Image (cartoon, grey):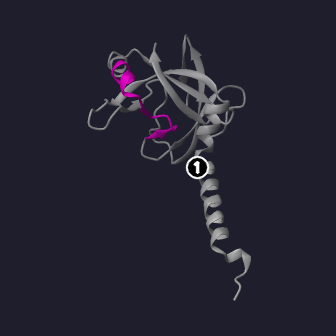
Amino acid sequence: MNRPALTSRPVLVAAALLLQVVLLVVAVRPQLSARLGGTEYRLAVAPIDPIDPFRGAYVMLRYPDLPEADNEPAGEVFVPLARDGGLWKGGRLERRRPADRPYLACRTSGYGRLDCGVDSLFLPEDKARRVQDELAADRAAAVLRIDADGNAALVDVVPR
């Protein structure tokens, strides 16, 4: 007895693999778009959680020059950016995309947290100690790549 071609094992496996690839691309599209086609911006950065030798070279970051999301309802918000010397600073949160200036597309949780997708960094071991020292001394800047839709990717932490 012949099975129909659409239910054969190789076709089902190929369809499942294709679906997984599509879901993966959809999930990483904003970060990938920012990394490949974004413009570079530098923002002041400070550690929230220092590098822990038991977790490897991983650090949680905060951006002192981005606004707080206090009393902001949950949802999508936009943070317009303005140059301040060699760094960029965030302005007041907006509900509409700024048309005439660079911005970050972020989300608020409704609990005062602003999530722009650039709050954690994984480093190679040889670079981790230098970055930790710069963060601790408040001498670091995050290098972000931001695309035209405000999607951001954290690409490096460098001395200010």
The quarter of the picture where residue 4 lies is bottom right
Image: magenta residue range: 113-131
Which residue: 64% across, 68% down? 10
Is 123 displayed left or right of 144 in the figure? left
The quarter of the picture where residue 52 lies is top left
Q: Report which residue position mark 1 lands on.
A: 27
Indicate the position of residue 143 as horizontal and vertical percent values.
52, 23
Is 160 displayed left or right of 146 in the figure? left
Which residue: 49% across, 25% down? 156
Reply above or below: 126 against 24. above
Is 56 displayed left or right of 21 in the figure? left
Indicate the position of residue 38 as horizontal and vertical percent values.
65, 29
Which residue: 66% across, 65% down? 15
How many marks the image carries: the answer is: 1
Q: What amino acid type should be assigned to the residue bearing mark 1?
A: Ala
Which residue: 33% across, 15% down? 137
Reply above or below: 108 against 101. below
Indicate the position of residue 66 as horizontal and vertical percent values.
49, 28
Indicate the position of residue 21 as horizontal and vertical percent values.
62, 54
